[in-house]
Image (cartoon, rainbow, N blue to C red):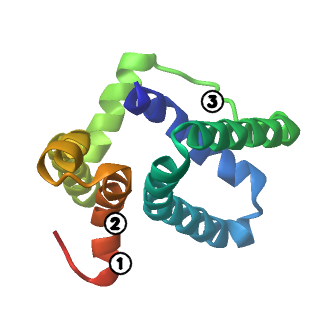
């Protein structure tokens, strides 16, 4: 369910940024966005594991709910974003075929998408992390949080798994 929502939400968020940030600040905005995302991916599970172990799961869900509400309020104040309208359309199927042709003939994009596909396909091991934490490693929620953060931490520390 989360992956399905991410598939539809991520392009929307990416399309919103150029409309909100001036052209000269665009690269800085992307950098800040990526930095905050990477920090959240690493620190979020690590901290959540310790919070769950100490205070239970309720505070984590409350904090998550509050953060979602804050982002919805911020999105409300952004208002409507002007969009460029394409006057000539050849239909959805034609657009999809044209996009696939472009991706296939652009070697860098094609190889990047292929690598991403395999990484996503074989990354389903992340769904087994709770089993590893409880049944194999016997580490509890703190260990599970650290296990979820470990792949990112290892990249930052120069250790590649």
Q: Position of residue 11 (x, y in %)?
A: 52, 39
Frontmost residue, 103 versus 149 = 149
Q: Quadrant of the C terminus?
A: bottom left
Of tags 1 and 3, the one toward the viewer is 1
Asked if marks 2 and 1 touch (Cβ < 8 Å), the reply is: yes
Position of 8 relative to 115 (above/below): above
Label 1: few (<14), some (14–19) or many (≥20) C-alpha neighbours in 10 Å:
few
Q: Which residue is mark 3?
A: 86
Q: Which mark is residue 152?
A: 2
Q: Which mark is residue 37?
A: none
Q: Residue furthest front?
A: 54
Q: Position of residue 20 (x, y in %)?
A: 76, 52
Frontmost residue, 92 versus 22 = 22
Give the residue at x 44% y 63%. Answer: 42
Q: Position of residue 131 (x, y in %)?
A: 19, 40
Q: Which residue is mark 1?
A: 156
Give the residue at x 77% y 42%. Answer: 70
Q: Position of residue 141 (x, y in %)?
A: 37, 49
Dot 1 or dot 3, earlier in sequence? 3
Cα distance in 3D space between marks 2 and 3: 40 Å
Give the residue at x 29% y 54%. Answer: 109
Cα distance in 3D space between marks 2 and 1: 6 Å
Label 2: few (<14), some (14–19) or many (≥20) C-alpha neighbours in 10 Å:
some
Position of 64 relative to 4 (above/below): below
Question: Quadrant of the rendered structure where residue 128 is?
Answer: top left
Frontmost residue, 76 versus 111 = 76
Q: Is disc 3 placed on a helix, strand or loop?
A: loop
Question: Quadrant of the rendered structure where residue 158 is?
Answer: bottom left
Q: Quadrant of the N terminus?
A: top left
């Amino acid at each position: 369910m989360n992956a399905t929502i991410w598939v539809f939400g991520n392009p929307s968020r990416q399309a919103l940024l150029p409309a909100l940030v001036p052209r000269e600040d665009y690269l800085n905005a992307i950098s800040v966005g990526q930095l905050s995302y990477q920090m959240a991916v690493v620190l979020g599970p690590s901290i959540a594991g310790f919070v769950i172990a100490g205070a239970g799961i309720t505070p984590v869900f409350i904090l998550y709910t509050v953060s979602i509400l804050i982002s919805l309020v911020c999105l409300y104040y952004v208002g409507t974003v002007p969009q460029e309208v394409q006057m000539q359309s050849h239909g959805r199927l034609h657009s999809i075929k044209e996009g696939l042709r472009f991706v296939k003939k652009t070697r860098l994009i094609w190889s990047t998408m292929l690598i991403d596909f395999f990484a996503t396909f074989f990354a389903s091991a992340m769904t087994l992390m709770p089993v590893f934490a409880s049944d194999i490693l016997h580490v509890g929620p703190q260990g599970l949080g650290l296990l979820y953060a470990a792949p990112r931490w290892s990249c930052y520390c120069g250790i590649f798994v």
